[in-house]
Amino acid sequence: MLNHLHTKYSRTMRGSGRGWLLLGFTVAAFIGFLSSAPVARAQDSTIRAIQNIFDPLSAPAETIYYVSVLVMVVCAGIFVVVGGLLVYAIIRYRRRGPEDDHEEPPQVYGSAAIELAWTVPPILIVVMLVLVTARTIGEIEHHKMPDAAEEIRVIGHRYWWEVRYPKHDVVTANEIHVPLSTRTNRVPTEMILESADVIHGFWVPQLNGKTMLVPNYRNTMWIEPYATGIYLGNCTVLCGQQHANMLIRVVVDTPEVYQKWLESQKQASVSDPQVAEGQQQFISNSCGTCHHIEDARGATGVFGPDLTHFSSRATLGSGVATNDDQHLRSWLMNPQDLKPGCLMPNMQLSSKQVDSILAYLRTLK
Ligand code: CUA
């Protein structure tokens, strides 16, 4: 989409000169508006990987987008006026012959009209942009959440995301499921953002602006997505060696699919006698000191991601690899291979131990 816009934009620039700049931005705004038409599908696995503020698919991101278009159009107008005057001056007062080398142009000193022209309009423009921006920030920050709003706590860790659903007693990690909001059934999701260690930043550009996760402080933000799919985002504050692999997946489900997902996450883990050996290995190798697994005795850690429904997640290591057996085996052998600098140490497991723990983890759906 961004590339698409860029091409459109540069074609407009090359073909028709600066005067078309304004039109170019209007076209960009219109394309953005069209592409934000509501889409709802039952089980949507569309990956919305384009990290593009010009293609908002959620209420606050859309408001931010409109303000940014306004700012760009105003700035484009200023560019045209200033650039136009500059080009006019260069052409109109260019050197016309050798006689120009001996003649000085009239020396004008102090003109009230010109002084006012280049101070008053710029001040008014800046004041207008400040007011519009301040009003938008206020509207987004003081948006009243309806009672039906979903509430999620997202806690940033080096280098993964803990996700809690206090209303439903559900805990997961890295993959955040939220309900779709439609015109007839508005379900915004309020996010309470906290940090367990250093400052992290939560940003899924198609859903909302950036918000920081600050230790010992609660930040809030909200999203109201109106298209299903899987939205990708990143941690935006340098938080350590694996900052770049602190990836976010927000899965927007229809309310029915979302309810089903919540139900499945509330299920206790099944204890399968076939993987008792794996569970035993999991506990005796101290995995449970960092990881919590509901109903598994000895797995009560809070330092690493909750693994109760680990195999229901599509990725591992906060999005660093797909959650398939090959990657999981590599992760268990030595997490530092896939994610160097992550806080899970190499547990020096034997290949046999890895096999049995892998089989156990696969039962945690
Ligand atoms: Cu967390 Cu960067």
Image (tube, rainbow, N blue to C red):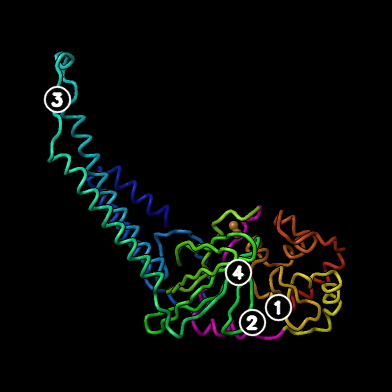
Q: Contact, CB < 8 Å: mark 1 with mark 4?
A: no
Picture residue at 59% right of the left edge, 83% below the top: 262
Which amino acid is tagged 3?
Gln
Task: Check residue 265 in the rendering and tell me which mark sits there, or answer none.
Answer: 2
Q: Nearer the viewer, residue 70 or 216?
A: 216
Question: Pointers 4 and 3 in contact (CB under 8 A)?
Answer: no
Crowdedness of circle 1 by 10 Å Cα count: few (<14), some, many (20+)? many
Instruction: Determine the image quadrant of residue 287.
Output: bottom right
Q: Secondary structure at mark 1?
A: loop
Task: Locate residue 265: give its quadrant.
Answer: bottom right
Any mark on residue 155, and which?
4
Find ligand 1 in the image and state its quadrant. Answer: bottom right
- 288 with respect to 214 (left or right): right
- Residue at 54% x, 81% y is 258
Q: Tag 3: Cα neighbours inside 10 Å, few (<14), some, or many (≥20)?
A: few
Q: What residue range appears in magenta? A: 241-268
CA gap, disc 2 to disc 4?
18 Å
For label 4, the crowd category at 10 Å Cα-Cα, with few meaning under 14, some 14 to 19 and many 20 or more, is: many
